[in-house]
Amino acid sequence: MIYILTGPVHSGKTTLLRKLSCELKKQKVKIDGFLSEVVLKDHKVIGYDLFNLKEEKSIPFIRRTGEEEWEKVGSYFFVPESQTEANRIILGGRDSDVLFVDEVGPLELAGKGFWPALRQVIFKPLTKYLLVIRINILKDFLEVLDQSNIIVFDIKNSEIFPQMIKKIKKAV
């Protein structure tokens, strides 16, 4: 089963996932994966950190400034070590009940970033996946997945949190 949380940029998707992961852990659901948490400096976004949900630690993930050889999408540079860590988390998350991936973006839609690792596991029904996908690329990504067992949750839905808990708990 693949669960997708969608919505626009800065709409609270990662905050909801943080809350959801805490609640699922309390209910003894084995979770793994990562969140992309915003990093601010002087009230301005300078990038995102990769927060490992299992180990509960962060590393730099995406930055507005970076090295020339780093992968770049739009105005952001991807820290190579964090891409390696994201791949490790995805490939190592097979033993979890739910694997969180925040977020699948244009880089993955183009077959890059952590998509090669995600592609290796997502089409196997061993684990439930909770992916964050921005609303503007959701349709394209659903075409890539081409699966019937997908449930999409929209962040705009005020009842989303209890609905997600109920659906995920029922499936694990």
Image (cartoon, rainbow, N blue to C red):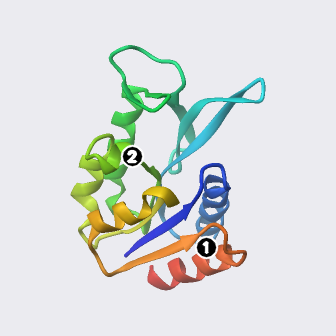
The answer to whether the residue labelled 2 contacts the one labelled 1, judged by CB atoms less than 8 Å apart, is: no
Q: Nearer the viewer, residue 112 or 140?
A: 140
Which label sits on residue 45? Answer: none
Which image quarter: residue 86? Answer: top left
Total marks in image: 2
In the figure, is residue 47 to the left or right of 123? right
Amino acid type assigned to the residue bearing label 2 in the image: Pro
Residue at numbered disc 1: 27
Q: Which residue is situated farthest in the top direction here?
A: 68
What residue do we see at 50% from left, 85% from top? 170
Label 2 to label 1: alpha-carbon separation: 33 Å
Query: How many other residues sit within 10 Å of disc 1, few (<14), some (14-19) or many (≥20)?
Result: few
Q: Position of residue 110 (x, y in %)?
A: 28, 46
Residue at numbered disc 2: 106
Query: How many other residues sit within 10 Å of disc 2, few (<14), some (14-19) or many (≥20)?
Result: some
Which image quarter: residue 164? Answer: bottom right
